[in-house]
Amino acid sequence: STPVTIFCSLTKAATSGLLLKGGDYVEALAGLKILAFDKTGTLTKGEFTVTDFSTVGDDINIQLLLYWVTSIESKSSHPMAAALLEYGRIQGIKPILENVEDFQNFPGEGVSGKIDGREIYIGNRKICVRAGCESEFLTKEERNGYICCGPTLVGMFSLSDTCRSGALEAIEELKSLGVKLAMLTGDSTHAATLVQNQLNHALDIVHAELLPHEKALIIENFKKDGLTAMVGDGINDAPALATADVGISMGISGSALAVETGHVILMSNDIRKIPEAIHLARTTFRRLV
Ligand code: ADP
Ligand code: MG
């Protein structure tokens, strides 16, 4: 191959805000068959707002519940935590961080901590299972968040997030380039469907409620069908980014681990640069043959 031509492509890509960590990725992008996106923070802005927050049962009132949730979530850097803190602030709740002991983060599930002698779990269904909760609400009521006090379900909430501007455009361009598109998310099926709707059902494959290693497993399977790229921003995306032929990480909002793991860094966070890069890569390789 002619390194000069590839070098030119790398420079050109860098000028438009796409940093490739090597010439091999130009070749991989040129022959790309499948592109998988993370949802939160990648296809969406990752800025959640709380749309409902309620108690389950009569034992705990909403103020106490919000005090537990905001105190524990103050220790999390997840975008959902920020939304819950803002919701509590508006309700006049003061989190007391010093009262939280044994804070734990479970990637793809949620968080837990001990507050005033109670074991509290906040997150999706998986963390409720971890708490030993078997409430029928977990299957009956579709929410992106549940709160357990020990094995008892004491609250539920929903959060909504919107697509990034340019997401629909990027998806449509990728489709016209003949790339198969997927979304892999740790969020609920309901939340995934809302994003698929906003994208005019353009995604070929949607998988929800995934743990970080399950995202990587799906990428491993995609690779059997051809060159596969994964786009993500979070710590939870790192295994999938590493597994993909091309791992693309979000530059501005991406976690340090995602940026370090990614083979390509999207400096501007603008996913419309991805079809542009594929186009550039194809042109480069057409010139070489
Ligand atoms: P994604 O794959 O969409 O980036 P994550 O793997 O970060 O999602 O999170 C998956 C799910 O885990 C979230 O949808 C949420 O239900 C739960 N979760 C993770 N962290 C938290 C947290 N700090 N508070 C509440 N829920 C959380
Ligand atoms: Mg994410």
Image: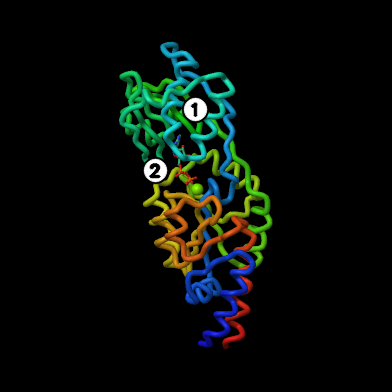
- Comparing 175 with 95, the one in front is 95
Sequence-first tag of 1 and 2: 2
Residue 56's spot in the image, x, y percent?
46, 18
Residue 248's spot in the image, x, y percent?
51, 61
* SS type, badge 2: loop
Spatial separation of the CA atoms under disc 1 and disc 2: 23 Å
Within 10 angstroms of label 2, few (less than 14), some, or many (20 or more) residues? some
Which residue is identified by label 1? 141
Q: Is residue 87 above or below residue 245?
A: above
Which residue is identified by label 2? 107
Residue 73's spot in the image, x, y percent?
44, 31
Report which quarter residue 116 is drawn in.
top left
Amino acid marked by disc 2: Pro
* In the image, the residue with mark 2 has its CB under 8 Å from the nearest atom of ligand 1: yes
Marks 2 and 1: in contact by CB < 8 Å? no
Q: Is residue 142 above or below residue 9?
A: above
- Residue at point 56%, 60% (across, down): 266
The colour style of the image is: rainbow
Amino acid marked by disc 1: Glu
Q: In the picture, which quadrant includes the C terminus?
A: bottom right
Report which quarter residue 105 is drawn in.
top left
Mark whose residue sits in front, 1 or 2: 2
- Residue at point 49%, 41% (across, down): 187
Q: Is residue 222 above or below residue 142?
A: below
Q: Is residue 124 above or below residue 150?
A: below
